Amino acid sequence: MKLSKFPYLVQKEIFDHMKHSNLFSLSLVSNNIKKLIKSSQTVRFQSISRITYRNLVNKWHVGIPFKTKNMGTMEEYQGTELIMTMSNLDDTKHACFQLNVSGKSMDFRVSDKYRIPEAYFHPSHKGSAFEIIHNYLLDFFGNTVEHIWQAKSYNHFIPQLPNLSLWVTIRPDRSEMVKNLDTFFDSSPALKHINIEWIKLLLISPESKFYQAESIKIIQPRSPTVNIFLRNFKGRQATLLYCKCEVSDLIEFMNRWRSGEHSRKLEYLRIRFTPGPALKPNTDPIISHFYIVRETDYRVASVSIQGSDFRFGVWRETEEEFLRIVE
């Protein structure tokens, strides 16, 4: 019996028990099925925070990370449910078929490894292929879902698409350290997270989009550049490892924050002066009895200094609300 012949409540019950990857695959069959899935899964799709695109040697994985922890504004994701892959056209003889996606005809096959749809295309059509898929995802899951492009180099293909943020991990070659980075950052989509090693902050413009990334992790051999970063960073979270920093730099930073003249968006800062474990962009709240208050809105920031580890975390609460919580 055809799915379309079932009553709506039965259809919804079936869809409710299907994985996102299966719902996505089924939606490609016809516009009517796609509409049925969207109308029955509106609430479920609203719970999706992000969709990621990840480059793996001329194959791109498109997936939905699932959240395992939410602590205030801090979120931690572990694992990703793949919904499709995309790859350059090759000479292998896979069974293929064509589907209508966002009004465009695209070639597909079933991924051998994951048993999910795999769109494939000639390398010269890569940009248009990603635009078609991206528009389909925006329509299917809703344009409130955050779409993140994960790249491991500024030399990788990064499309310019609406509602797309960039999560990039860069280990610049020393000969290319300065020449291309400013241009790369300024021509990139909205910067979500930057993970970068060995960067000469002195040679990056204070107005660069680098400093506007929501989250940054810098692995920096000892170099007196922390104060430059603290003066220019306009994002939400930052982690600096193996950095040289003077106490006066930290005092200056806290005084600027306290006055309300700087770091208005900042939620979390961590500076580790000696080697330690790798840290994720989102980290747990700070437990400390030492705090400072911002003069403009009375928001509280906890401050922790333990050995070679400095942490600074901003609360949503005012001082009065904060004290009620910690009492």
Image (cartoon, rainbow, N blue to C red):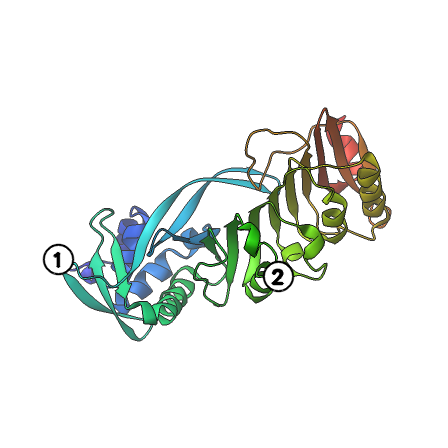
- Asked whether the residues under the numbered discs 2 and 1 touch, taking CB atoms below 8 Å apart as contact, a structural biologist would say no
Question: Mark 1 highlights which residue?
Answer: 1
Query: In the image shown, does 13 or 178 lie closer to the viewer?
Result: 178
| Mark 1 crowd level (few <14, some 14–19, many ≥20, 10 Å Cα) | few
**Circle 1: residue type:** Met
Looking at numbered disc 2 in the image, what kind of residue is underneath it?
Asp
Q: What residue appears at the point 62 percent right and 48 percent down from the top-left corner? A: 199
Q: Nearer the viewer, residue 78 or 317?
A: 78
- Residue 20 seen in this snapshot: no
Residue 103 vs residue 230: left or right? left
Q: Is residue 62 left or right of residue 151?
A: left
Image location (x, y in percent) of residue 185:
58, 61
SS for tag 1?
loop
User: Where does label 2 land, which residue?
Assistant: 182
How packed mark 2 is, by other alpha carbons closer than 10 Å (few <14, some 14-19, many 20 or more), is some
- Identify the residue at image location x=67%, y=41%: 268
Q: Report helix, strand or loop for mark 2.
A: helix
Horizontal side of 285 relative to 277 (left or right) equals right
Residue 35: x percent and y percent?
32, 65
Q: Which mark is residue 325?
A: none
Quadrant where the C terminus sits is: top right
